[in-house]
Amino acid sequence: MNDFNNRRTLPNGLQEPTGQRWRFIRFIGGSYRIPLPPGPPPKPSKAERELEHEQELRGEASVARFHVIGLFHVGVIVISLALVAVVTLAVLALTSRH
């Protein structure tokens, strides 16, 4: 009854949507699998919202650091190319005798 999309075909011919359909309650020595209630998912708690906000801020800071590191590497490459050009021009100026 399962197709390649890992969806279960219901008796009326429709397919069950993908995603987590179970809530797991774990305890020492075992666990229960309980189906999720119908309707929209529950709103995250204040602690979950704060954790998500903190992770978002941490991610933005990480992106900013990578951006700065990338700009630094580009600057190093540009300055080294300019230095190579100056050294090449200096060598050409010193070796050419007019």
Image (spheres, rainbow, N blue to C red):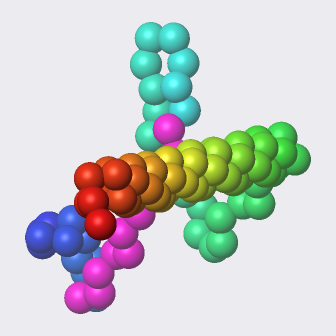
- Identify whether 16 is placed above or below 64: below
Residue 21 magenta: yes
- Visible residue check, residue 77: no
> Farthest residue toward the right?
46
- Identify whether 85 is placed above or below 38: above
Residue 33 x %, y %: 45, 40
Q: 88 and 45: which one is in front?
A: 88
> Farthest residue toward the top?
29
- Identify whether 34 is placed above or below 88: above
- Visible residue check, residue 86: yes
Residue, x 26% and y 60% (percent of image)?
A: 96
Residue, x 38% and y 75% (percent of image)?
A: 17
Residue, x 25% and y 70% (percent of image)?
A: 7
Task: Indicate the quadrant where residue 20 lies.
Answer: bottom left
**Relative side of 62 to 96, left or right:** right
Residue 86 x %, y %: 44, 56
Task: Give the magenta range.
Answer: 13-24
> Farthest residue toward the bottom?
13
